[in-house]
Image (cartoon, rainbow, N blue to C red):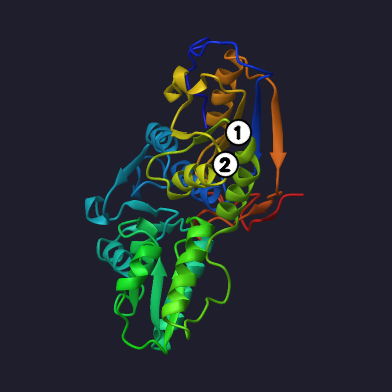
Amino acid sequence: MPRVRREAGRLKDLPVDGAKQVLLAAPRGYCAGVDRAVVAVEKALDRYGAPVYVRKQIVHNVHVVRTLEKMGAIFVEEVDEVPPGANVVFSAHGVSPAVVSAAEDRGLHAIDATCPLVTKVHREAVRFAKQDMEILLIGHTGHEEVEGTSGEAPEHITIVNSPDDVDDLEVKDPERLVWLSQTTLSVDETMETVRRLRERFPKLQDPPSDDICYATQNRQVAIKKIAPDADLVLVVGSSNSSNSVRLVEVALEYGAKAAYRVDFSSEVKQEWLDGVRTIGVTSGASVPEVLVQELLDDLADAGYADVRATVTAEEDLVFSLPKELRQDASGKKDARALGGRIR
């Protein structure tokens, strides 16, 4: 991702009591699913040429979308906006079977960039529906991932938005319930929702494995470590990025005196820095590292040049590319075609 034009000296170095420092969270930024999706659009453009259409935002980040648009990607809300026979990429958040069918009806060449961890939740929904289980899907109504998962078994799924929804929930058979979740939620809030669900429905079954993705959990753990020592936490991420918004909430819950989300460093306000000695910095799972570096540059101008990494986990997972993009037009296999671990 290209660098964002920076206005040097925009933030002023004003005195505070004590030494200024930045606590930089790690892991942060791109997860394996986001990286796979963005690379999929780039390789589709390289292989098929522009335009390549993308249903919804490929990932929830303004900078990423704008950059891919400049390369020739066209983002649409639904596949009926895509010319018949054209190339279309499904976003990392996944789609319902109805969207897949609509793309087939238009003769579109569809490339599925759904995160494999989201695909896992889809498969769980299908399996439990076949067992005639009622599925309580913990997630946010209207979020693309929730819409995609719900579309796998709409007659079997009820969405639970928050712990406060539990008391008014009506189910068909409290003996045949299982819960699943959106992958980008707050771990703590999700577990509180499950706790309250189990109080009402003791026979509630768990999914075979945790649905909240490893990257979401890792970024929350890192900011929990930093928050108690931070006068201010800055989260780089877009407003429609669920995991970025959750990072702000988690920071405040775990002791940060203030926390804000910004798309770009230029959105940081001078008054946020008043009296601030220690700033925690992190970014959501759909944020390219260049945006964090722009923020660190601006903070250095304001006297926060001492950057200390707080590492709580190492991430080395790379997901395989969609099958259509594992080799180029000449048949040469891509070096990361099948994914694996970065050593």
Q: Residue 211 carries which label?
A: none
N-terminal label among 1 and 2:
1
Q: Does residue 31 appear left or right of residue 268 in this picture?
A: right
User: Which residue is found at the position 25% from the left and 61% from the top?
Assistant: 106
- Badges 1 and 2: C-beta atoms under 8 Å apart? yes
Q: What residue type is disc 2 on?
A: Gly
Residue drawn at (48%, 63%) of the image? 190
Q: Out of 197 and 4, give the one closest to the viewer.
A: 197
Pinpoint residue 259: horizontal percent, then vertical percent.
49, 35
User: Does the rendering let one see residue 322?
Assistant: no
What kind of element bears circle 1? loop
Residue 45 vertical position relative to residue 308 in the rendered view, above or below: below
Residue 272 drawn at (x, y percent): 47, 23
Residue 216 shows in the view = yes
Tally of numbered tags: 2
Above or below, 79 against 157 in this view is: above
Q: Which of 158 and 73 is in front in this view?
A: 158
Report crowding for label 2: few under 14, some 14 to 19, many 20 or more residues within 10 A (C-alpha): some
Residue 217 to residue 62: above or below: below
Q: Nearer the viewer, residue 56 or 22?
A: 22
Between the C-alphas of marks 1 and 2, the distance is 8 Å
Residue 260 place in picture, x, y as percent: 46, 34
Q: Residue furthest left?
A: 80
Residue occupying image coordinates x 72% and y 50%: 342
The circle on residue 255 is 2
Question: What mark, if any, has residue 230 been given in the picture?
Answer: 1
| Residue kind at label 1, given as amino acid type | Ala
Considering every residue shown, the one lying at the far front of the view is 17
The 10 Å Cα crowd at callout 1, few under 14, some 14 to 19, many 20 or more, is many
Q: Is residue 317 left or right of residue 326?
A: right
Q: Nearer the viewer, residue 310 or 165?
A: 165
Name which residue lies at 50% across and 81% down: 205
